Image (cartoon, grey):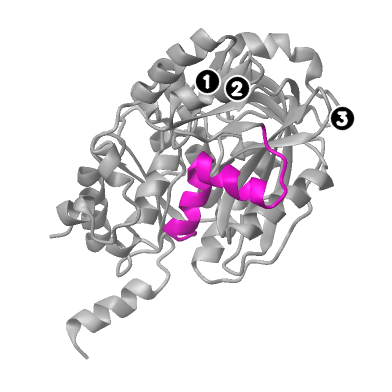
């Protein structure tokens, strides 16, 4: 047998070495801790030296790579070279854009390491809010009134009632613009377009409650893991990123989320976000986050070990379906909104299990260094707010051998 053939056989064997990217984010820290506790050897990477996940006791090796959002070609070249030289079972990202790049250029990694599902075409239908909302509406799923035109004049003439919201169509975790007048809409739409690229305009949904359905689907498009979270406290006045949330039972939202994910043939992890319209109490689909979520720690506390079951799924170990989870579990992100902690103090459960009061996304008595790192070395340039290089070229999803692929292959 040729030397190269023997090498490929060993590469296809499980090494129990996992590479986790985006170590500056809360979700990655939760993934590192989860898999590290399972005695997997965890290598964590980030473009930022002060990324808190790099300093977890469960991180065996740390990497600093080129910024995937500003230098995607250099990032991909680095990652391909890395997996060629090292034996990893899989790569697990937690940032939407890192997931985007790995999905789009999956073929570059196929001979060396496993990447999480889904395939790029499926991923893109969840990633692009405009495409997702069109699919949802075609399948009878209630969404905010959305103006899909690319012409600002057409949008302005179509809006019947204010306020409306301008949001990026292809970026996740970035700000939105709430517009109260026609002049406001024209001004903010142009600013959002210049900053984030293609945008959509929607009616503003008065907040009657925000919920997320968090799930893992297998390669047969069947759910194998689930939690539902209700946001209690948020970082921004209009909602958005949660700083305090609780697991709840909501079969109606689960049914809608599963129907949508099955319709787009989803596999892998996803969070389907809903807002209850306080005017009619009807849940409205907001978006899908096609990757791990910032509040992953709450799912883990509720008994749903998403990182490990995703690992098992990627390793073809056929993880069992476990759709039950603990309700009434709370978790907060204290450093995301310190003032909000005191604002929502009365909403924290204080019961027989006093430890539940200390549930936090980052703070851990058994793994304290990441908290100290994030406290003393606040992150800069670590979000999707950053400008992107060659953004238009990267989004040419209809070309198999596009410009970016030609730059990376060698």
Q: Is residue 343 above or below residue 308?
A: above
- The answer to if 125 sits in the magenta stretch is yes
Residue at image x 82%, y 42%?
250
Query: Residue 333 is drawn in which quadrant?
Result: top right
Query: Residue 274 is drawn in which quadrant?
Result: top right
**Image coordinates for residue 237, horizontal then vertical, percent:** 63, 13
Tell us which disc is closer to us: 3 or 2. 2
Q: Dot 2, how many residues are within 10 Å of its Cα: few (below 14), some (14-19), or many (20+)?
A: some
Q: CA distance from mark 3 to mark 2?
A: 52 Å
* Nearest to N terminus: mark 1 or mark 3: 1
Determine if residue 33 is in view. no
**Residue pointed to by mark 1:** 156
In the rendering, which numbered label is found on residue 205?
none
**Image coordinates for residue 404, horizontal then vertical, percent:** 22, 50
Q: Give the secondary structure at mark 1.
A: helix
Q: Which portion, as a residue range, is magenta?
A: 118-144
User: Marks 2 and 1: in contact by CB < 8 Å?
Assistant: yes
406 or 114: nearer the viewer: 406
Would you say 61 lies left or right of 328 here?
left
Q: Dot 1, how many residues are within 10 Å of its Cα: few (below 14), some (14-19), or many (20+)?
A: some
In the rendering, which numbered label is found on residue 352?
3
* Nearest to N terminus: mark 3 or mark 2: 2
Quarter holding the N terminus? bottom left
**Residue pointed to by mark 2:** 159
Q: CA distance from mark 1 to mark 2?
A: 6 Å
Q: CA distance from mark 1 to mark 3?
A: 55 Å
Would you say 208 lies left or right of 386 here?
right
Residue at image x 26%, y 82%?
6
Determine if residue 311 is in view. yes
Q: Is residue 336 above or below residue 133?
A: above
Tell us which disc is closer to us: 1 or 3. 1
């Amino acid at each position: 047998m040729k030397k190269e053939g023997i090498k490929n056989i060993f590469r296809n064997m499980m090494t129990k070495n996992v590479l986790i990217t985006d170590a500056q984010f809360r979700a990655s820290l939760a993934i590192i801790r989860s898999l590290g506790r399972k005695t997997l050897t965890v290598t964590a990477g980030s473009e930022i030296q002060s990324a808190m996940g790099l300093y977890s006791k469960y991180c065996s090796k740390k990497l600093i790579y080129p910024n995937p959002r500003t230098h995607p070609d250099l990032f991909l070249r680095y990652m391909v070279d890395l997996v060629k030289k090292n034996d990893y079972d899989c790569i697990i990202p937690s940032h939407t854009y890192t997931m985007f790049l790995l999905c789009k250029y999956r073929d570059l990694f196929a001979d060396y390491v496993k990447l999480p599902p889904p395939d790029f075409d499926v991923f893109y239908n969840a990633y692009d809010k405009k495409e997702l909302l069109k699919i949802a509406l075609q399948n009878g799923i209630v969404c905010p009134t959305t103006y899909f035109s690319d012409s600002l004049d057409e949008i302005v003439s179509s809006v019947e009632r204010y306020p409306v919201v301008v949001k990026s169509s292809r970026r996740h975790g970035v700000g939105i613009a709430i517009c109260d007048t026609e002049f406001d809409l024209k001004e903010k739409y142009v600013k959002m377009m210049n900053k984030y690229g293609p945008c959509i305009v929607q009616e503003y949904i008065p907040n009657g409650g925000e919920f997320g359905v968090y799930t893992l689907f297998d390669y047969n498009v069947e759910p194998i893991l689930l939690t539902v979270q209700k946001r209690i406290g948020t970082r921004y006045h209009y909602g958005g990123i949660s700083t305090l949330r609780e697991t709840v039972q909501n079969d109606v939202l689960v049914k809608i989320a599963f129907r949508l994910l099955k319709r787009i043939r989803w596999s892998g992890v996803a969070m389907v976000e809903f807002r209850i319209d306080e005017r009619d109490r009807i849940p409205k689909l907001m978006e899908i986050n096609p990757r791990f979520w910032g509040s992953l720690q709450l799912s883990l506390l509720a008994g749903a070990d998403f990182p490990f079951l995703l690992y098992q799924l990627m390793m073809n170990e056929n993880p069992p379906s476990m759709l039950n989870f603990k309700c009434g579990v709370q978790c907060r992100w204290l450093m995301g909104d310190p003032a909000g902690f005191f604002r929502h103090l009365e909403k924290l459960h204080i019961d027989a299990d006093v430890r539940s009061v200390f549930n936090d996304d980052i703070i851990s008595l058994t793994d304290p260094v990441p908290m100290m790192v994030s406290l003393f070395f606040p992150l800069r340039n670590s979000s999707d707010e950053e400008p992107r290089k060659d953004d238009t070229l990267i989004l040419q999803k209809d070309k198999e051998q596009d410009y970016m692929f030609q730059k990376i292959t060698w």
